Image (cartoon, rainbow, N blue to C red):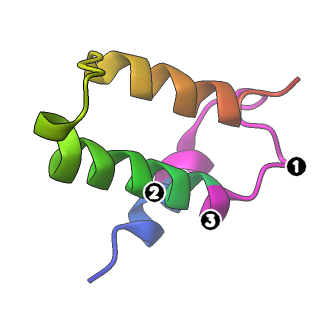
Amino acid sequence: MSARPLFQDILRAAPPGTVDPAVDPDDVFDMLLGAVLTRTLLFGATARARPVERTVEMILRLLRPA
């Protein structure tokens, strides 16, 4: 089962004006998935021990209207 439909449901439930309609939710999901996989698989091998909140903030920036 994919989490992609759930992610799209979350975006649809967001308050009006908080998600840029020009942003492709599949692209954002792919970026989120890549960030999670990188953090999970390479966390010990990278020198960048950033808090997970930083990743969340970056994803929110992708979704916000300009």
**Amino acid type at image mark 3:** Asp
Q: Read off the residue under disc 3.
A: 26
Cα distance in 3D space between marks 1 and 2: 16 Å
Identity of the residue drawn at 28% across and 55% down: 37
**Amino acid type at image mark 2:** Phe
Q: Are marks 1 and 2 in contact (CB under 8 Å)?
A: no
Closer to the camera, 21 or 48? 48
Closer to the camera, 46 or 2? 46
Magenta segment: 10-27
Question: Which element carries disc 2, helix, strand or loop?
Answer: helix
Rendered position, 12 above or below 52: below
Q: Is residue 24 magenta?
A: yes
Question: Which element carries disc 3, helix, strand or loop?
Answer: helix
Instruction: Tell whether 13 sits left or right of 34.
Output: right
Does label 1 or label 2 sit earlier along the sequence? 2
Cα distance in 3D space between marks 3 and 1: 12 Å
Task: Name the quarter where the C terminus is drawn.
Answer: top right
**Amino acid type at image mark 1:** Ala
Q: Is residue 42 magenta?
A: no
Does label 2 or label 3 sit earlier along the sequence? 2
Q: Read off the residue under disc 1.
A: 22
Q: Read off the residue under disc 2.
A: 7
